[in-house]
């Protein structure tokens, strides 16, 4: 159930978010930022000004009215790009650097893993893999991967 909010959020004709504070002050080009984008993506959202000043803290997206929640979700999804690996098809070598061919929630792709240090453990059983271009790939649950994917992954952990 959404809670009443004391601020307004809209999009102007240029597609920028406009935040109007309770005192009537308007801020153009505000940006929503997740505090915990991987482990708690629906809670802990700050809306910050173009100068990086926090304007409002949102405990949970679910508490917002539909129109504001939709605007924030759209903005967050357009800014965040973190494909989730669903399956590891193959790797070119078990020595780094190597090329990984994977299936993600955004389609099939290949990337170069520079070193084992680019695989970071998050809250178990999640992993974050950074490719040579700085794109982060998420494995939300290593135990949910198929046997072949887990076997490949184990060689790097």
Image (cartoon, rainbow, N blue to C red):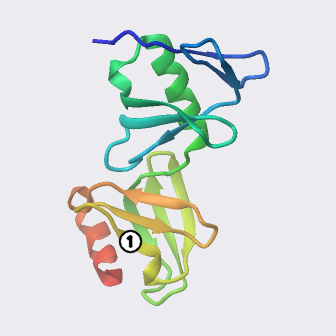
Give the class, few, some or many, for how many residues have Cα within 10 Å of label 1's Cα (few <14, many ≥20).
few
Compared to residue 54, the image places residue 27 above or below, namely above
Screen quadrant of the C terminus: bottom left
Residue 26, x across and y down, in percent: 68, 18
Screen quadrant of the N terminus: top left
Residue 90, x across and y down, in percent: 43, 72
Left or right of residue 96, residue 86 in this image: left
Compared to residue 104, the image places residue 43 above or below, namely above
**Residue at the location (51% across, 60% down)?**
136
Compared to residue 73, the image places residue 86 above or below, namely below
Q: Quadrant of residue 127?
A: bottom left
Q: Quadrant of residue 88?
A: bottom left
Q: Residue furthest bottom?
A: 95
- What is the count of numbered marks? 1
For label 1, the SS is strand
Residue 116, x across and y down, in percent: 43, 82
**Residue at the location (46% across, 20% down)?**
69
- Closest to the observer, 120 or 10: 10
Q: Residue furthest front?
A: 23
Residue 44, x across and y down, in percent: 38, 38
- Closest to the observer, 89 or 133: 133
Return the residue at label 1. Answer: 120
**Residue at the location (64% across, 31% down)?**
30
């Amino acid at each position: 159930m959404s809670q009443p909010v004391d601020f307004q959020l809209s999009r102007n004709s240029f597609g920028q978010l406009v935040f109007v504070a309770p005192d009537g002050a308007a801020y153009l080009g505000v940006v929503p930022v997740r505090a915990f984008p991987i482990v708690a993506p629906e809670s802990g959202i700050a809306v910050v000004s173009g100068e990086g000043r926090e304007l409002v803290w949102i405990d949970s997206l679910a508490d917002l009215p539909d129109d504001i929640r939709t605007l924030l979700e759209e903005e967050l999804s357009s800014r965040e790009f973190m494909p989730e690996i669903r399956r590891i098809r193959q790797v070119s070598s078990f020595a780094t650097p190597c090329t990984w061919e994977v299936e993600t929630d955004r389609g099939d792709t290949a990337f170069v893993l520079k070193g084992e240090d680019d695989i970071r453990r998050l809250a178990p059983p999640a992993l974050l893999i950074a490719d040579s271009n700085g794109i982060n790939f998420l494995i939300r649950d290593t135990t949910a991967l198929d046997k072949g994917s887990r076997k490949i992954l184990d060689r790097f952990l």
